Amino acid sequence: MTETPSLYIGLMSGTSLDGVDGVLADFSHGAIQTLSAAFTPFPAELRSELMALQAASDNELEREALAANALALVYADCVRSLLPSCPAPVTAVAVHGQTIRHRPELGFTRQTNNPALLAELTGIDVIADFRSRDVAAGGQGAPLVPAFHEAAFGKPGVARVVVNIGGIGNISVLHGDGRVTGFDTGPGNVLMDLWIARHQGRAYDEDGAWGASGAVHQPLLDELLDEPYFRQPAPKSTGRDLFHEPWLNAKLASFSAVAPNDVQATLTQLTAVTIARAIVDAGVRPDAVYVCGGGAYNSALLRAIGVELDGVKVESTAALGVAPNRVEALAFAWLGWRFAQREPGNLAAVTGARGPRILGALYPA
């Protein structure tokens, strides 16, 4: 008898605030198979509102609730675009939500979402709120993807590092002996995106071309690196709560004469250096570093990481069979599957939680 596919849709909208990545995945027999993928961009008004909600503002409760409703509509559109490729009914939609506050040191993390509305719109069970249980158990609630990286990309006896470069960067160190460590390294694309939007009106630096046209300004890089977060021991996590426009403006205050493209080159180097130092500090010499997220499409950034790692091979997760823009959505589909199996989704060694926990909450259709 042929087993019915175990189908889950994973939805991820990250700190880059560009839109929703969705994947349809099959976890039959414990395998991890991507059947299809989709991307649904945010309407400009929703992106602006989600960006504004990153900081304290007036009437936040109502504005966040309305943004959550609008976000659920985008999530539903992404789900609908994946349904025609489903060979069987989808068990559940696993949705991360849009992080607008991440303060685990205060005991909370906030992912804007309306999973009840998403269940109503799609007629499919929804699993959401993956981070709060880990925080309740004393953890950072992030990063959650290392457990998935080990399941999807780990190879016994081989040390590998998986780097996700979205708005924020994070690493998963797969030691090859079953141990997994990882944490948020600091800015991924967030500062580069802010700077190019300010000077060129573009959402991101395509392939790192603008940054590559400039030169790294070492005194500015030293100032950017003089941030306590980089010296803080793991477990740790961060976000736009720290690395935002006021932070960048303060760091640039004494460097107004630096050319804009040189600033972009220096911000690119900041991301490369902080990622490379985190890998070196992990005490492994990996066979390769595999990059996912939007940063995987910035060849200048990948070259810079490779130089900082003294020639370690740096390439995208496509080399391991998963396109870099699909990894995080696939990770949350996997976390949804883990929830349905009543299996833990976190790694206490990564987040600092008191132990393994089942992550998520169910909103039945």
Image: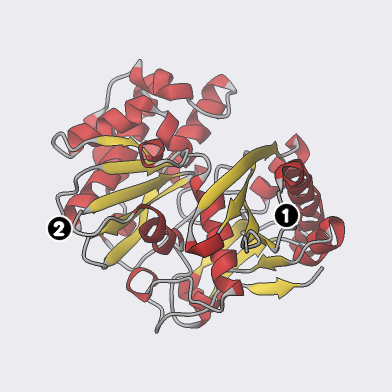
Asked if residue 140 lies left or right of residue 307, the reply is: right
Separation of residues labelled 1 and 2 (CA atoms): 45 Å
Specify how the rendered protein is coloured: secondary structure
Q: Residue furthest front?
A: 1
Vertical arrangement, residue 332 with respect to residue 21, above or below = below
SS at mark 1?
A: loop
Instruction: Give neighbour class at mark 2: few <14, some 14-19, many 20+ (Cα, 10 Å).
Output: few
Q: What amino acid type should be assigned to the residue bearing mark 2? A: Gly
Q: Nearer the viewer, residue 271 or 1?
A: 1
Within the image, what quadrant is residue 283 found in? Answer: bottom left
Vertical arrangement, residue 4 with respect to residue 198, above or below = below
Asked if residue 108 lies left or right of residue 51, the reply is: left
Asked if residue 42 lies left or right of residue 150, the reply is: right
**Residue 118 position in % (x across, y down):** 79, 59
Q: Is residue 33 shown to the viewer in this render?
A: yes
Q: What amino acid type should be assigned to the residue bearing mark 1? A: Ala
Vertical arrangement, residue 251 with respect to residue 329, above or below = above
Q: Which mark is residue 88?
A: 1
**Residue 190 position in % (x across, y down):** 48, 41
Q: Which mark is residue 152?
A: none
> Where does the N terminus fall, quadrant-wise?
bottom right
Within the image, what quadrant is residue 109 found in? Answer: bottom right
Instruction: Give neighbour class at mark 1: few <14, some 14-19, many 20+ (Cα, 10 Å).
Output: few
> Where does the C terminus fall, quadrant-wise?
bottom right
Rendered residue at 78%/50% (across/down): 76
**Residue 316 position in % (x across, y down):** 37, 36
Q: Is residue 260 shown to the viewer in this render?
A: no
Vertical arrangement, residue 176 with respect to residue 255, above or below = below
Q: Which mark is residue 283?
A: 2
Of the two numbered discs 1 and 2 on the same chain, state the one appearing first in sequence. Answer: 1
